[in-house]
Amino acid sequence: MITIARRSGMRRRRPRLVLTVQIAVDDSDIPARRLLRRWAAAALERDAAITIRFVDTAEGRALNRTYRRRKAATNVLSFVYDDEDGALRGDIVVCLPVLKREAAEQGKALDAHCAHLVVHGMLHLQGYDHILPGDATRMESREVAVLTELGFLDPYTPPARSLTRTRGSR
């Protein structure tokens, strides 16, 4: 059916995204809204109304404790509220201090890591998961494909370390 639609010049409609961005942390390192929209839309497979909320460590920790029974803040949480009538509604919560720490530890640009977490959260909202190995492979493959389309490197491949000479080497 897709082949027939393409032959007749018809294209599948892109999913519609209504995006709200909430900033509950005092920080100027949050990417521009147009970038957040671009990253979220790239991972979207159906119509959606999504809120991306940036939080501090205290709020991230409280949400993680309440909904996942974990003590520490995590990088991204996803909450689906409704996925009826073909439209998905949900929230993605990004803990900015965790995002920044991880980007630094992994040697990644902040925008690249943020794009990864937004895509990761969007996929979770749409039913992707990584608990079982097969599901993890499927989700990671989709993440890599979306991020590559956006111009980012594979987030699961460690950045190349520059070769440094060790003491005594020639």
Image (cartoon, rainbow, N blue to C red):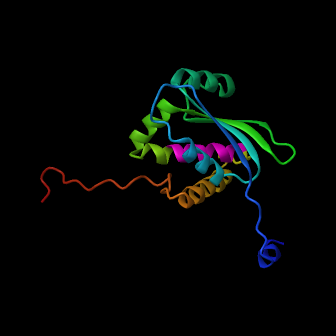
Residue 55 in the image: state x and y as whole percent: 56, 27
The residue shown at (41%, 44%) is 106
The residue shown at (56%, 61%) is 149
Q: Is residue 165 magenta?
A: no
Residue sitting nearer the eye, 35 or 151 = 35
Residue sitting nearer the eye, 74 or 41 = 41
Residue 93 in the image: state x and y as whole percent: 61, 33
The residue shown at (84%, 48%) is 86
Vertical order, 13 against 69 (above or below): below
- State which quarter of the image contains the C terminus: bottom left
Residue 160 in the image: state x and y as whole percent: 36, 56
* Horizontal side, residue 62 vs residue 48: left or right: left
Vertical order, 82 against 135 (above or below): above
Residue 92 in the image: state x and y as whole percent: 64, 36
* Horizontal side, residue 58 vs residue 11: left or right: left
* Horizontal side, residue 143 vs residue 83: left or right: left
Image quadrant of residue 77? top right
* Horizontal side, residue 16 vs residue 151: left or right: right
Residue at the far bottom in the pictured view: 7
Please state the extent of the stretch shown in magenta in the rendering: 114-125
Q: Is residue 119 magenta?
A: yes
Vertical order, 11 against 91 (above or below): below
Residue sitting nearer the eye, 17 or 73 = 17
The residue shown at (68%, 44%) is 124
- State which quarter of the image contains the N terminus: bottom right
Image quadrant of residue 3? bottom right
Residue at the far right in the pictured view: 85
Can see residue 78? no
Can see residue 88? yes
Residue sitting nearer the eye, 135 or 162 = 162
